[in-house]
């Protein structure tokens, strides 16, 4: 296909992909801000996608609140939000393709089976390494398992794709040491995160994925899926998370840092944006600023490689006390 774009610059298409399983907090806001600025500062597009297929955890009304949170921050998107729960047919087609080429096999192991069979040490948050109990099955064996509950696992094999992360540089993770063969379809007739994300990012022409570095182990898995499905992968950019004073990922135990609660408490979005921009090295001092005024100041390379520690003093500097606002 010839390139008919006169500027010869490909259009940047970024995405915001919240999970409406709970309220969005300051940590989510920082990642969304970086993702939005990265695309918009180069005249790119932004797709909003609701990752709502983890149905038992999805809270009613959370999608609407997420949109309110993003609007409050001054972050916009192009077109209607993409809703994963409305796209199951596309994920089923991708699974069928993986089955046809024997890239996946049915796995009847329970969580307990996997934990007990795994002997090698594993990364805590990635769970035990799948020991390959069911890897001798072929895709067609799934038909004989009809009455049993089973998942579909992707055969990782011996290659773990390396990639050049837009923030971290060359990155390599050995999937045989991080989880092993991974689930692309859960037993409850539900696609798993890895498959849905790849299908959607490819379908909507996403050229860059900016997300928290807790998702780093997902990237080699997703690259294997891109390869198996003959799809073109985006540029991956993993940015540091926001953590509490104890160094752990921002959560309820650190007090209420939900954006809706900041809004109710009368915090101005420009104050929060100023704090986030200062933490990313775009402002020399804490001051109020709008998302739009940050466009010319955005630089990926000034973001510190360490997580942002959200000390109570930082919250007080924008007129908020996390501990006073309930759980
Ligand atoms: Zn198994």
Image (spheres, rainbow, N blue to C red):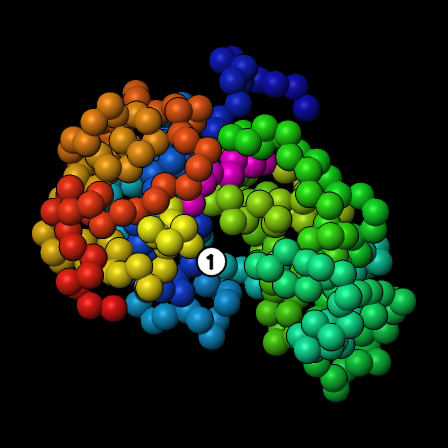
Magenta span contains residue 306: no
Q: How many numbered discs sit on the rendered protein?
A: 1
Q: Is residue 190 left or right of residue 40?
A: right
Quarter where residue 196 is shown:
bottom right
Q: Is residue 152 visible?
A: yes
The answer to which of 183 and 82 lies nearer the viewer is 183
Q: Position of residue 173 (x, y in %)?
A: 69, 43
At x 81% / y 77%, what residue is drawn? 143
The answer to which of 126 and 85 lies nearer the viewer is 126
How would you rate the neighbour count of disc 1 (Cα within 10 Å): few for under 14, some for 14-19, many for 20 or more? many
Whether the residue under disc 1 has CB within 8 Å of ligand 1: no
- Please provide the residue range marked out in magenta: 234-241
Q: Position of residue 25 (x, y in %)?
A: 31, 54
Q: Position of residue 98 (x, y in %)?
A: 76, 56
- The secondary structure that most of the magenta stretch takes on is strand
Magenta span contains residue 240: yes
At x 46% / y 33%, what residue is drawn? 305
Write down the residue under mark 1: 51
Q: Position of residue 179 (x, y in %)?
A: 69, 58
Q: Is residue 132 left or right of residue 31?
A: right
Q: Say which element carries label 1.
A: loop
Of all residues shown, which one is farthest toward the front? 246
């Amino acid at each position: 296909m010839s390139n008919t774009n006169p500027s010869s610059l490909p259009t940047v298409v970024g995405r915001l992909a919240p999970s409406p399983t709970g309220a969005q907090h300051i940590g989510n806001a920082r990642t969304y801000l970086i993702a939005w600025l990265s695309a918009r500062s180069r005249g790119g597009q932004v797709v909003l996608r609701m990752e709502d297929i983890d149905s038992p955890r999805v809270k009613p009304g959370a999608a609407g609140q997420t949109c309110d949170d993003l609007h409050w921050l001054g972050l916009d998107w192009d077109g209607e939000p993409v809703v994963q729960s409305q796209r199951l047919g596309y994920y089923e087609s991708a699974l069928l393709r993986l089955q046809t080429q024997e890239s996946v096999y049915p796995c009847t192991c329970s969580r307990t089976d996997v934990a007990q069979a795994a002997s090698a040490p594993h990364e805590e948050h990635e769970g035990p390494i799948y020991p390959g109990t069911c890897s001798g099955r072929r895709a067609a064996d799934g038909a004989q398992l009809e009455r049993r509950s089973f998942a579909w696992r992707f055969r990782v094999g011996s290659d773990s794709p390396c990639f050049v992360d837009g923030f971290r540089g060359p990155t390599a993770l050995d999937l045989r040491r991080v989880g092993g063969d991974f689930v692309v379809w859960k037993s409850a007739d539900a696609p798993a995160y890895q498959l849905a994300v790849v299908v959607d990012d490819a379908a909507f022409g996403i050229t860059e994925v900016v997300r928290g570095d807790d998702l780093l182990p997902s990237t080699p898995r997703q690259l294997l899926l891109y390869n198996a499905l003959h799809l073109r992968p985006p540029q991956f950019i993993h940015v540091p998370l926001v953590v509490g004073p104890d160094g752990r990922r921002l959560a309820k135990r650190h007090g209420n840092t939900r954006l809706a609660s900041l809004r109710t408490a009368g915090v101005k979005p420009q104050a929060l944006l100023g704090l986030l921009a200062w933490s990313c090295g775009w402002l020399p001092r804490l001051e109020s600023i709008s998302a739009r005024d940050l466009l010319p100041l955005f630089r990926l390379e000034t973001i510190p490689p360490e997580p942002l520690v959200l000390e109570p003093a930082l919250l007080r500097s924008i007129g908020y006390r996390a501990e006073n606002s309930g759980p």
